[in-house]
Amino acid sequence: MGKRNKHIEVEINETKNNTESFTEYELVVRKKVIGKLQQEGDGLVNVEFKSGKKRTARSIDEGVQMLIEEHNLHDE
């Protein structure tokens, strides 16, 4: 017996902390913020999880993937 895939809406919202050289996004699942992504210029992306843990990603896409994986492992 297999589980069905659930369709979950994920939003990526820009925060008010953005400037010309700094970008910050919030990742929202089911109206709950599960983490933040911060990038200065075209450099590495700082990923902050809901638990407070921080990691570094090479791109925004990789950071989003990290946040979704963490959410699926610990919050489902």
Image (tube, grey):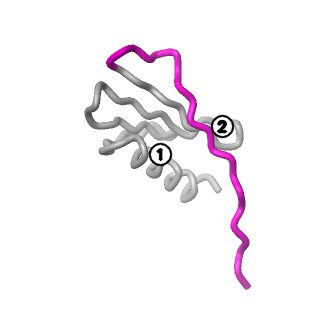
Query: Where residue 35 sits: x, y (%)?
Result: 51, 37
Residue at (35%, 35%) from the top-left corner? 46
32 in magenta = no
Residue beneath label 1, please?
A: 64
**Quarter of the view holding residue 3:** bottom right
Q: Is residue 12 left or right of residue 52?
A: right
- Sequence-wise, the earlier of marks 1 and 2 is 2
Q: Give the label on residue 49, or none.
A: none
Near-viewer residue (68 or 14): 14
Name the secondary structure under disc 1: helix
Name the secondary structure under disc 2: strand
Query: Where residue 32 sits: x, y (%)?
Result: 66, 37
Query: Where residue 26 sits: x, y (%)?
Result: 53, 32
Residue at (36%, 15%) from the top-left corner? 20
Residue at (70%, 80%) from the top-left corner? 2
Residue at (34%, 36%) from the top-left corner? 45
Above or below, 2 relative to 27 = below
| Crowd around label 2: few <14 · some 14–19 · many ≥20 (10 Å) | few
Amino acid residing under circle 2: Lys
| Crowd around label 1: few <14 · some 14–19 · many ≥20 (10 Å) | many
- Mainly helix, strand or loop, the magenta region? loop
Above or below, 61 relative to 76 = above
18 in magenta = yes
Q: Assign the C terminus to one quadrant of the image.
A: bottom right
Above or below, 47 relative to 7 = above
Q: Which residues are magenta?
A: 1-21
Residue beneath label 2, please?
A: 32
Query: Where residue 74 sits: x, y (%)?
Result: 56, 55
